[in-house]
Amino acid sequence: MRLIALAAIVSVIVIAGPDSGSGSAHPEAAQAPRGMGTLRGRVDIRRAIGVTARRPGIADLTTLPPVETPDARPAVVYLETADVPDTSPLRDGLTGSPPGRARMDQRNETFSPRVLAITTGTFVDFPNNDRTYHNVFSLSKPKRFDLGRYGKGKSASERFDLPGVVRVFCDIHSHMSAFVLVFNHPYHTTTDSDGRYRIDNIPAGRYTVTAWHEGEVRDTRMVTIPPTAGPTDLDLLVQ
């Protein structure tokens, strides 16, 4: 019996090893945490942007219609694809995160911003700032909803739980449309007025970077985020 007990003790020592204080039997668990990096750059938009013709209303008899600036419509830059596996390091940024909140205004019979990038679980508010009624709805597969008609000063909200592209419309004004891009990871952003973007706190590794613009993926590149280095620069092209 003493020999059996001694053999068991020796086996435990051999298996656990001198670094068993980490409390894990997996070698990778004892390694240092992955480094974090930053990806930044500019999206050059060279394609022409079509504009849906605005339908005249009664208010146009006394006021001039708003002027839309389609060249200012942003692109969305994100890592990997919209469907990220549970094992991907991109999921780490959402662990324990509370639901977020975003806003898409209805002003001058347009949605502002026209393009909104959010993470799953985010509530989006749709306030009405016009003198006319609006009715926000979507028939997109990731999120089907109809907020009904409501007037100036009123607002309605919707929660987006599934990743994907959601096209948003107004049931009263056919020229109104917008996009809500929903991701199940936090590594996405929209470009600013100069076409620049920046994504911080990216786990070190190799990723696919995608530039999305006006309903379609326009450019895709591969990039490596090193564990210890300054920002990684990557320009993208939309044409």
Image (spheres, rainbow, N blue to C red):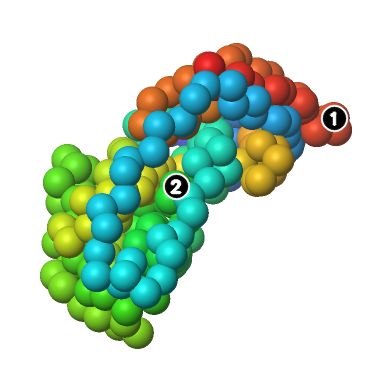
Crowding near pointer 2: few (<14 within 10 Å), some, many (20+)? many
Name the residue: 44% across, 47% down: 115
Name the residue: 70% across, 23% down: 235
Dot in front, 1 or 2 = 2
Which image quadrant: the N terminus? top left
> In terms of secondary structure, where does tag 2 sit?
strand
Quarter of image, res 14: top right
Q: Position of 183 compared to 26: left or right? A: left
Q: Nearer the viewer, residue 94 or 128?
A: 128
Which numbered dot is residue 104? none
Q: Position of 18 compared to 207: left or right? A: right
Q: Which residue, given by chain and number where applicable, does mark 1 sit on? A: 229
Q: Amino acid at mark 2?
A: Val
- The answer, for residue 216, to whether it is visible in the render is yes
Identify whether 120 is placed above or below 105.
above
Q: Residue furthest right?
A: 230
Q: Amino acid at mark 1?
A: Ala
Q: Residue furthest front?
A: 61
